Image: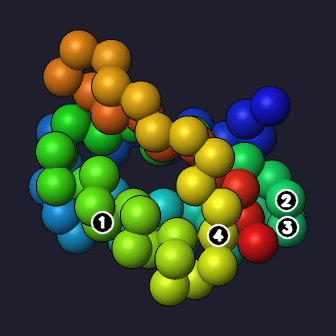
């Protein structure tokens, strides 16, 4: 279940990461945010982001030119 969705289509690095970090700050532990991006570089960025901050990258999928991430806050 997704608690929040963040549409970052059209934004390049580092905006998707920065906005996701801001959104997660206002969420409770174990809540899930879905982030929709078009920046292909965000694939490696979100893996590193989750590894560094301890959040769980539940899924990452491609839908056309969009990449959809589901991240669970630690």
Which callout, 4 or 1, points at the residue further toward the start of the chain?
Answer: 1
Q: Nearer the viewer, residue 19 or 66?
A: 66
Q: Which residue is mark 1?
A: 45
Circles 2 and 3: CB atoms closer than 8 Å: yes
Secondary structure, mark 4, is loop
The N terminus is located in which quarter? Answer: top right
Callout 3 environment at 10 Å: few (<14), some (14 to 19), or many (20+)? few
Q: Which residue is mark 4?
A: 55
Label 1 vs 2, first from the N-terminus: 2
Write down the residue under mark 3.
29
In front here: 10 or 41?
Answer: 41
Question: Which comes before the other along the chain, label 4 or label 2?
Answer: 2
Q: Residues within 10 Å of mark 4 (few under 14, many from 20)?
A: some
Label 1 to label 3: alpha-carbon separation:
21 Å
Residue 9 percent across, percent down from the top left = 25, 36
Say if 26 sits above or below 54 in the image.
Answer: above
Q: CA distance from mark 4 to mark 1?
A: 13 Å
Residue 28: assigned label: none
* Residue 33: x %, y % from top left: 63, 47
At label 2, counting other C-alpha atoms closer than 10 Å, the crowd grade (few under 14, some 14-19, many 20 or more) is few
Query: Disc 2 on helix, strand or loop?
Result: loop
Classify residue 40 by image quadrant.
top left
| Residue 26 visible in rendering | no
Question: Label 1's element?
Answer: helix
Q: Residue at x 26, y 55 (%)?
A: 42
Tags 4 and 2 in contact by the CB under 8 Å rule?
no
In the rendered view, does 35 fall on the left or right side of 1? left
Dot placed on the residue nearer the N-terminal end, 1 or 3: 3
Q: What residue is rendered at 46% in x and 39% in y?
A: 60
In the rendered image, which residue does mark 2 sit on?
30
């Amino acid at each position: 279940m997704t608690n929040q969705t963040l549409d970052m289509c059209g934004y390049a690095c580092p905006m998707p990461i920065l906005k996701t970090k801001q959104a997660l700050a206002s969420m409770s532990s174990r809540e899930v945010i879905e982030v929709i991006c078009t920046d292909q570089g965000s694939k490696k960025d979100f893996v590193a982001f989750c590894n560094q901050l301890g959040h769980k990258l539940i899924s990452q999928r491609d839908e056309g030119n969009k990449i959809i991430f589901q991240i669970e806050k630690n």
